Image: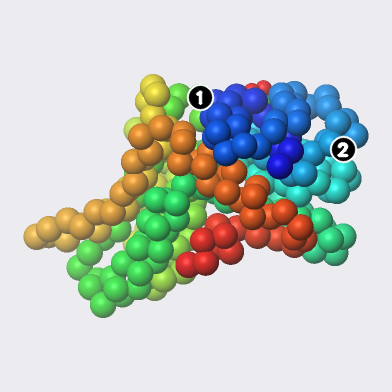
Amino acid sequence: MKIALIGYGKMGKTIEEVAISKGHIISCRLDSSDFDPSELANSDVAIEFTQPDAAVSNILKCYEANVPIIVGTTGWYDKYEVLSKKAREENKALFTATNFSIGVNILFHLNEKLAGIMNNFSEYKVHMDETHHLQKKDHPSGTAVTLAEGIINSLNRKKKYIGLLDGQEAEISAFDLQIISKRQPDIPGYHKVTYESEIDEITISHNAKNRQGFAQGAVLAAEWIKGKTGVFGMNDLLNF
Ligand SMILES: NC(=O)c1ccc[n+]([C@@H]2O[C@H](COP(=O)([O-])OP(=O)(O)OC[C@H]3O[C@@H](n4cnc5c(N)ncnc54)[C@H](O)[C@@H]3O)[C@@H](O)[C@H]2O)c1
């Protein structure tokens, strides 16, 4: 398959390694906003890992070039509904995931299950932590937001999440789910959900040892989307 890489930073380079090891060809590497949709003409699929303010325009360029797009960039989801609607109406292909790692997607399922169980155990207070490298632009991470949404959907006593950078203070009500974001050197991604009572603590977490898991998932999605139109995510790919 001929894969266009939109964004050739830490993730773009890791995806290139994984794609080549699986016999794919990198048709182009587009690493700034000034590329034209015509540069995608020779590609079967595009994989986009750039930055929050770039994703929307890159998705629209792929629609214009009629090339399916796999989007790993997080922090642009306020435009998700508009772009999904456009994909459906105009027969384009959009695949997004806040986290392409299989392990994290297993954690997403455990998280929802555990949150549902906790409806019967009000003595447990829940909170979340995430840690990423210093260059990460958005907080809380897209993955943390997905985990928080999973808890809010399944646990009746939480209504919304509040994201804080480590050390930041805010008024937190009993209905709020607190997410603390830490930024430290060289951390690809760590997420933890904690349920704490007076007598014990239950935690579920995922620690990415490197970026390979994200890259493998993104390439898998690129292989899977061939020939499809519509809007997809990891649940479609993994069949959970
Ligand atoms: N969904 C996931 O599984 C997952 C995993 C890891 C990272 N991410 C997200 O992916 C994004 C990229 O992560 P990274 O670690 O590779 O970042 P990075 O900063 O190392 O690389 C981003 C690259 O995008 C390029 N870029 C910026 N604007 C562009 C544009 N308009 N068009 C094309 N290229 C452009 C930059 O020059 C840079 O090389 C971030 O939003 C990060 O949070 C998602």
Pick out the residue farthest to the bottom: 120
Using a 10 Å C-alpha cutoff, classify the residue at mark 1 as few (fewer than 14 neighbours), some (14 to 19) or many (20 or more): few
State left or right for residue 4 relative to residue 130.
Answer: right
Q: Measured from the top left, where is residue 1 in percent x and y?
A: 71, 42
Task: Report helix, strand or loop for mark 1.
Answer: loop
Q: Quadrant of residue 31?
A: top right
Q: What mark, if any, has residue 135 been given in the picture?
A: 1
Residue at 67% x, 29% y is 7
Amino acid type of the residue tagged 2 in the rendering? Ala
Measured Cα–Cα span from mark 1 to mark 2: 32 Å
Q: Depth check: 51 or 18 in front?
A: 18
Q: Measured from the top left, where is residue 139 in percent x and y?
A: 50, 39
Q: Can you tell me which quadrant of the image ligand 1 is in?
A: top right
Amino acid type of the residue tagged 1 in the rendering? Gln
Q: Is residue 30 above or below residue 172?
A: above
Q: Measured from the top left, where is residue 210 in percent x and y?
A: 41, 32
Which residue is under mark 2? 41
Using a 10 Å C-alpha cutoff, classify the residue at mark 2 as few (fewer than 14 neighbours), some (14 to 19) or many (20 or more): some
Q: Depth check: 70 or 143 in front?
A: 70
Q: Between label 1 and label 2, give the one nearer the viewer.
A: 2
